[in-house]
Amino acid sequence: FWIVGFMQTGNPDRAFRLLTAKDLGQIKRGCLASLVLLTIWTLVGFFLGWSLAVVVPGVAKTDLAFGEAINKFAPYMMPLLMVVVWAGGMSTLDSGMIAISAMLTKDVYRRNINRQATDEQVYRVGRMISIALGVFAFILALLNLKTLWFFVGAGAAVAMQWTPAIIAALYWKRATTAGAWAGILCGVGITALFYYVIQCPIPGPGGAAILGMVVNVLALIFVSLATQPLDEKHVRKYQGLFR
């Protein structure tokens, strides 16, 4: 619950939609809305799975309870359920693919590999990257790896470490670049340490992510306060991008 909830602001398919914001106010409201509302919806999803697992006994996994309940009590709703699930999956997948493609083409290809690349060249490279990502995701789905969900959860726990930096950049003028990087690196490091190396002292799948988030926030605050504040002109320059 904590992993899925707090990762929403830093989730690529959520952050990508912020590029369409009209102004900085929309970005601020959008970040908080995605954090609060999607966390509430995540809680609803968890309780729904648990309650339906009681209604439909014998279900081996709680993530199958919703489908089993529909199949038992309202089988005529099954086509609608499948359409909704597919639509939600496609929406998330294509946003993630576009976000990754944009980062690789603009931040890696155009900035470091071919600085003279035209928009047409960047577009062609981005299209090839999107196709490769789609094929890779399709192969992973066909393999049905038993450890896949572990890596999905670990990836989400790492993604949520971007949330403090994003919130601080939007709401705390004293935040600095060094503080943001210190928080992200410490948060990701602690999360990865307790996921892959040693056992986390907090039980449950969210324990490592919670510890990482706490260390992240503390590092961001202390390093930001210990380093020189960002120039006011620099802050105003980027805050005015969406005006």
Image: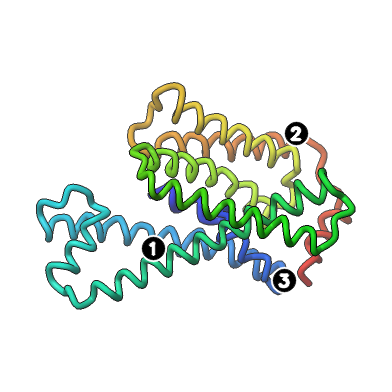
122 sits left or right of 101 in the view: right
Q: Residue furthest left?
A: 57
40 sits left or right of 48 in the view: right
> Which secondary structure, mark 2?
helix
Indicate which disc, 1 or 3, sits on the residue closer to the N terminus.
Answer: 3
> Which secondary structure, mark 3?
loop
**Which amino acid, by three-letter code, is at mark 1?**
Trp
Mark 3 Cα-neighbour bin, 10 Å: few <14, some 14–19, many ≥20: some
> Which secondary structure, mark 1?
helix
* Cα distance between the residues tagged 2 and 1: 38 Å
Residue at (56% x, 35% y) in the render = 188
Residue at (25% x, 61% y) in the render = 48
* Cα distance between the residues tagged 3 and 2: 31 Å
Looking at the image, how many numbered discs can be counted on the residues? Answer: 3
161 sits left or right of 78 in the view: right
- The label number, if any, that marks residue 41 in the structure image: 1
Image quarter where the C terminus lies is bottom right
- The label number, if any, that marks residue 23 in the structure image: 3
Relative depth, front residue between 230 and 126: 126
Mark 1 Cα-neighbour bin, 10 Å: few <14, some 14–19, many ≥20: few
